[in-house]
Image: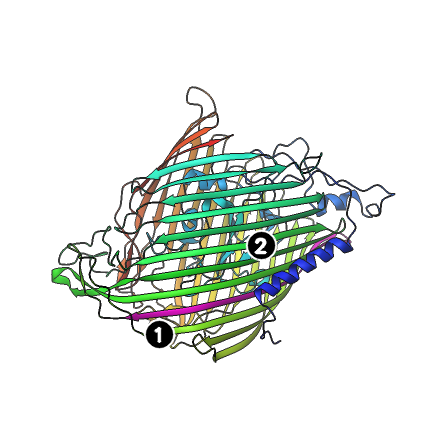
Amino acid sequence: MQLRGGALNSLGMLRSAVLATASAWVLVPQASLAQSSTQSGAQNLPSVTVTAPEARRRAPVSTVRSAPRRSMQAVNRSKPQPQRNVGFVETPRGPVRGYVAGRSSSGTKTDTPIMETPQSVSVISAEQIRDQKANKLDEVLRYTAGVRAGTFGADTRNDWWLIRGFKSDDVGLFLDGMQLFYTSYASWKLQTPNMERVEVLRGPSAVLYGGSSPSGIVNVISKLPPAEPIRYVETGVNNFGNAYVGFDVGGPVATQAQNGKLFYRVVGQVQNGPTQVNFTPDNNYFIAPSVTWKPDADTTFTVLASASRQETRGINFLPYVGTVTNASFGKIPTSFFAGDPSVDKFTREQEMLGYQFERNLTDDLTFRQNARFAHVDVTYRGYVGNDYGNQATATLNRYNWYAKNTANQGDLDNQLEYRFDTGPVKHTMLFGVDLKGYQIDDYQAFGFGVSSINIFNPVYGQAETPLPTTPFRNFQITQKQAGTYIQDQMKLGNFTLVLSGRNDWVATTQDARDTGATVSSRDDSRFSGRAGLIYNFDNGIAPYVSYSTSYNPIIGLNAQNQLFLPETGKQAEIGVKIAPKGFDGYFTVSAFDLVRQNVATTLPGSVPVLQNQTGEVTSRGIELEAVANATKELKLIGAFTAYHLFNSKDLDPSLVGKTPTNTPELLVSGWADYTFRDGPLEGFGFGGGVRYIGSSWADTANTLEVPAVVLGDLALHYEWQNWRTALNVINLTDKIYVASCASATSCFYGDRRRVTASVSYKW
C-alpha cells in the first residue's frame, strides 16, 4: 500500500473527518431531544460531586426510530445504565471518586471495568494529582507501578519516564486516546491542571493504537465541559520563587428554554519564576477551551483546543566524577549553570485543535470519531557541558549547540462498536480505522570552540561563539500511517476473552530541507495481535493471562543520519487482580516477559548525543500495586516494581547481558492521605509518601554505578467552606542525589527540596 503523495496529509485528514461526521448526522435519524448525560469533569484540586446521568430517552413507537428489538437484559449488558439513587456514576473519560477508578477505556477503547481487562492498567485521578501537587506529567507518574518517572531529574524542558525499563515518553504519550509522538527536540508538553485522569497501560498496545512503545503508553484524559457549573481559581508559590495562578470555569450554556444542550469549559494557568538551577526559569503559559454540544441523548460532539508557551533553558550535562563521586574539588553544586544566560534559551510554542464525536446509531451500535491536529515549534540554543577541561581547577569544557524543530501531527480514529449475543456469549465488537500523519523539520548544528567555564567562579556574558555555518542535521522527515483493527470482547459467565488484531501500512520519507531532494525512504507493513483471558471469581479475585505483539515505525535518524528501522516487540504476562467485596479499592500482581527489538540506544562518547539500534533488550519482572479509598478519611497507594533488564542481543558481544544505562531495576513507593471529616479538626488533612529508586548504571559496561536513593514527600491541607490551602513538599530531607547518568559525562541531578504553598477558592 503506497501512502506517499499527501494521501494522509494532516489537514486533509481533518477535512475528511468533518465530512464523515456530517454524513453520520444526515444519514441517521435523530432521537427526541433530551437533557444531556452528565459527563462532568472534576477540579484539578477540589473534587466534584457528579449526579447520575439521565437515562437515554426512548422514542415512542410512532416516531421514525423503531422500538428497541432486544431484551432488557441485553440492553443492561451493552452499556452502563444509570443508578438512580447513587450520587456518582463513573465514566472512562470522567472524574474518579477519590483515588480508585473502576473503569477505563485505554486497554480496550471501550467502556470496560478494570477488573475485566486482562492487562495491567493504572489510573491516576485528578484528586491524587491535587493531593501530591504534581507540577509536570512525569511527577504525576511517581507513585505508579512499572514506571520510572523523572529519568533526567530536574529538567524543566520535558517530561521523562520509563515503563518496564524502556523509554516511553517519545512514542508512548497519548492525549484522549490519540498519540502525541515526538522525535529529536520537537517534544510536547501537557499541563497538569487540565488532566481529568492519567491512565497507564503497561505492555504492548500497538494492536489498538498503532506505532507505540512496546512497554506501554500513558494516556492523558482532558477535562471536559461539565453539566454542573464550575468556578475555580488557585494561586501558589514555591521556595525557589516560582509562582502561578490558574483558573477552571465551565458549565451549561442556556441556549434554549431547556438548559443543558451546550456546555463549555476553559482551563488556564500562568507560571513564572526561577528553579533550583541558576538562570533557569520555568515559565509556562497555557489555555485550554472546550465546548460540548448534545442535541439529543444519543449524540455528543466536543471540540477541544489548547495553546501553550514555555520559556526555560537547557539541562546541565555533568560528569560522573563530581556528581555521583567526589572530584578533587568535591561535588559540583546543584545550582550550577553550565551554559551562559546571554546565549542559552529553550522555548516551546504548542497548539492543538481536535474533536470527539459519538453517536448511538441503534441500541446495539455506536460510532465514534476522534481527530486532532497539533503543531509544536521548539528552539534550543546553548552551551553544553562536555567533561572536564581540568578537574584540578574545576574547569568544565563546553560545546556549542543549536536546534530548531517544527513538527505537525494529524490523527484521525474511527471506531464502530457493535454489541450482540451468540447464544450465551456476549460480544462487544470493535472495528476501527485510524490515520496518522507526522512531519518534522529538523535543523541541528553544533561545534566546539566555546570557552571553558569554572564551576565555582563562572564568568558569563562573554562574546557569543558563532555556530558552524553547516549543520550536521538539516532534514524534513515525513511519516504517513494507516491502520485497521478489530477486537472482540467475549464474555461467557465469569470468563472474559479479548482477541484483537491490527495491520499497519507506513511510509517514511527523509528529504533534505535546503534542496527538497529525497535522501531516503522506506515502506513498511506489519500485523500486531493480542489475546487476553481473565476470570472474575465472585469473591473479587480475577486471574488473567495475555500475549501481545508490538510494532513501532520509529521516526528519526541514527548516528549515520539514516532512517531508523521499525521496532518490534512481544510480551507474555500473567497476573491477578483483587477487589475485595465491600472494599473500595483493588490490588494487582503481574509478571511479564517483554522483548524489544531494534532498540535505539545512546552511542557511547558521542558529541552531540547520537543513537544507534543495537539489537534486542529483554525486560522480565514483577509489579505489585494497591489503590484504596480505605475509609472516607483515608486514601492509600502502594507500588512495587522489580525487573531484570538486559541486552539479549547486541552488535557488541561484550554488552550482551548488560543493563542499559539510566535504568533502575527496583522501584518501591507508597502514599497515604488522611482528612478529618468531623470533630474539632474537620477539614484538616495531611499526607505523605516514600519513594525508593534503585541503583542504575552510568556506562554500558556496567562499571559505574549510580546509587539508590530514598525520597520522602509531605502534604498538609485545610478545607474551610469554599477555600482550600495546602503546603506540599517533595524531597522532604533535601537529599542531594543524581537521578541518572546516560554516560560517564552525562549525569543529571534530581529535584532538591521544593516547598509549594497554595490557596484555592471554588464557588
Q: Is residue 736 magenta?
A: no
Expressed as whole percent of the image width and height from the top left, the position of residue 374 reads 52, 58
The colour scheme is rainbow
Mark 2, residue position: 354
Expressed as whole percent of the image width and height from the top left, the position of residue 718 reads 41, 28
Q: Earlier in the sequence, mark 2 or mark 1?
A: 2
Expressed as whole percent of the image width and height from the top left, the position of residue 317 reads 28, 60
Q: Main secondary structure of the magenta part?
A: strand
- Give the magenta range: 418-447
The reply, left or right, for residue 233 in relation to residue 74 is left
Of all residues, the one furthest to the left in this rendering is 392
The reply, left or right, for residue 547 in relation to residue 515 is right
Mark 1, residue position: 472
Q: Mark 1: which amino acid?
A: Phe
Near-viewer residue (369 or 331): 369
Q: Mark 2: which amino acid?
A: Gly
Of all residues, the one furthest to the right in this rendering is 62
